[in-house]
Image: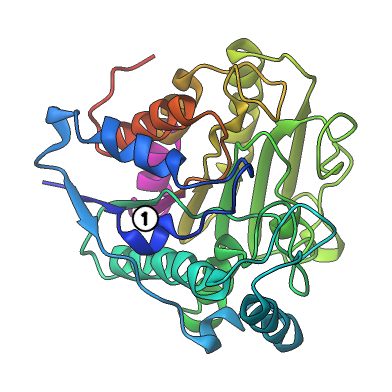
Amino acid sequence: MARIAVAKGEELLKYSFPEPHPLNKIRLERFYELLGKESSLAEDLVFTKPVKATYDEILLFHSESYVKFVEEKCRQGHGYLDYGDTPAFPGCFEAASYVVGTTLDILKRILKGEFAAGFNPMGGLHHARRDRAGGFCIFNDAAIAIEYLLKVEHVNNVAYVDIDAHHGDGVCYDFYSDERVIYADIHQDGRTLYPGTGFRNETGGGKAKGRKLNIPLLPFSGDGEFFKAFQEVENFIKQFEFDFLLLQCGADALMGDPLTNLQYSPEAHRYAASSLKKIAEEKCSGRILAMGGGGYDPDNVARAWTAVVKALADKSERR
């Protein structure tokens, strides 16, 4: 029986910005509450404890000067790590380190065959760049996971799919010319939403040309538009060979999110996870790790992420 790892622990709840910031621990608490009611998952899930990343692991992607900057701002416990979206708070360095370490821990255990798939609900902090924070993201655990796979595990190629309402600029541009990273991203049009990036003509640089896919959707796009776009994602990534698949499944694309204008239902997330799981089984022995990403309506977050976990465990109804 395939087991699915889901990270859970107080350390992840501490990646929570002071009120009234929209990224807070209530999102995770609501998700764990709903997931706990899914009796069909009882035998499939293993709750794994958060793990703190080492300094060297964070440096796989981020510059040393930036990491030291975060440490100093954490000691100060106030101000911002960027231009106004990402506040510093006491303990923010440790909290961000636990997000990174937890993503890496599940990834390593999937590689060892301990789990068939995994989910870090606090992961997917895709806006942080090598040398700066951005969009509520301090350290980019998704990018660090990619660097770990390439630099430590020496895999040939990694596939990364992002369905968060916001474009995953920190992954897209910092691997833009790296042909080993197959990147596909469906998001709200950057002309209408932060970070203002991710356009159709951005398909990779140099040898990576044609290995990046950005699909911007107009505000108020719903499941119909998503499924059409996702079919393009499926066809795109199936062209390539890869050794691991990463999914950033931000729930802020669901109807009613206070920060965005897309109108998906949780079926979009269920379908994406189910489809990518099948593709991973065909391409990379089923190795897939999902990360929670954004989502600022706690009930939406709970429904979308629970749908993802059920799909990874093959417990969801087919579309």
Left or right: residue 218 versus residue 112 is right
Kindly identify which residue carries mark 1. 287
The answer to whether 208 appears left or right of 315 in the picture is right
The answer to whether residue 114 is left or right of residue 155 is left
User: Magenta span has 278?
Assistant: yes
- Nearer to me, 52 or 146: 52
- The residue lying at 56 percent from left, 81 percent from top is 151
Q: Check disc 1 and give the amino acid type.
A: Arg
Quadrant showing the C terminus: top left
Q: Which residue corresponds to the image point at 71% horizontal and 33% vertical from the top-left? A: 187
**Of 40 and 230, which appears nearest the observer?**
40
Residue 233 location (% of width, % of height)? 62, 34
Q: Which residues are magenta?
A: 275-290
Q: Residues within 10 Å of mark 1 (few under 14, many from 20)?
A: many
User: Looking at the image, which is closer to me, 316 or 306?
Assistant: 306
Whether the magenta-drawn stretch holds residue 176 is answered as no
Quadrant of the image occupied by residue 206: bottom right
Task: Report the colour scheme.
Answer: rainbow
Residue occupying the point 42% across, 69% down: 104
Q: Is residue 256 left or right of residue 169?
A: left
Q: Quadrant of residue 224?
A: top right
